[in-house]
Image: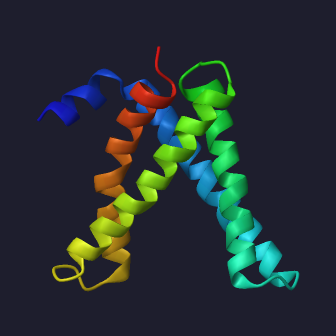
Amino acid sequence: MWLREYIRKNHKIFIKFCIVGLINTFIHYFLAITLIKSGYSFFLANLGGFSCALINSFYLNAIFTFNKPINFNAFQRFLLLSLGGVLATLLVDNISSDILHSDQIKVIFAIIVVLPVNYILLKSFVYKA
């Protein structure tokens, strides 16, 4: 499979990408929980956590993962790709709902499907050489 071979050739960068993803997950989660405990609605707290994690993701991936300069055009492409990632996750959820009946398994399945595609698109579209 070409995807497996692509990631294998770029495994060090892919590992950095996954580390950044874990950091962003923690930022999103802990900021959202903190905001909820501070009295913000679930929606605003989740939006705040997601927004901070998204901005952090752009900067860390530019600097740490792909060693690229930070610029507004790349940020616009990043936002577009992030929106596409959310839509792809929703599509995977919709398609897998008839097959997978556990939300936890659906989340894992969505990560397995969307993560490598997101990595390749970030590398070639947002942080291109």
Q: How is the image coloured?
A: rainbow
Examine the image and state in which quarter residue 113 appears.
Answer: bottom left
Where does the image place residue 10, in percent across and percent down from the top left?
Answer: 35, 23
Q: Is residue 66 left or right of residue 97?
A: right
Where the N terminus falls, by quadrant? top left
Examine the image and state in which quarter residue 61 appears.
Answer: top right
Where does the image place residue 69, in percent across and percent down from the top left?
Answer: 66, 18
Q: Residue furthest top?
A: 129
The residue drawn where x is 69% and y is 46% is 55
Q: Residue furthest left?
A: 1
In front of the other: 12 or 88: 88
The residue drawn where x is 31% and y is 72% is 93
Q: Is residue 38 left or right of residue 50?
A: right
The residue drawn where x is 53% and y is 36% is 77
Where does the image place residue 59, in percent across and percent down from the top left?
Answer: 68, 35
In front of the other: 85 or 57: 85
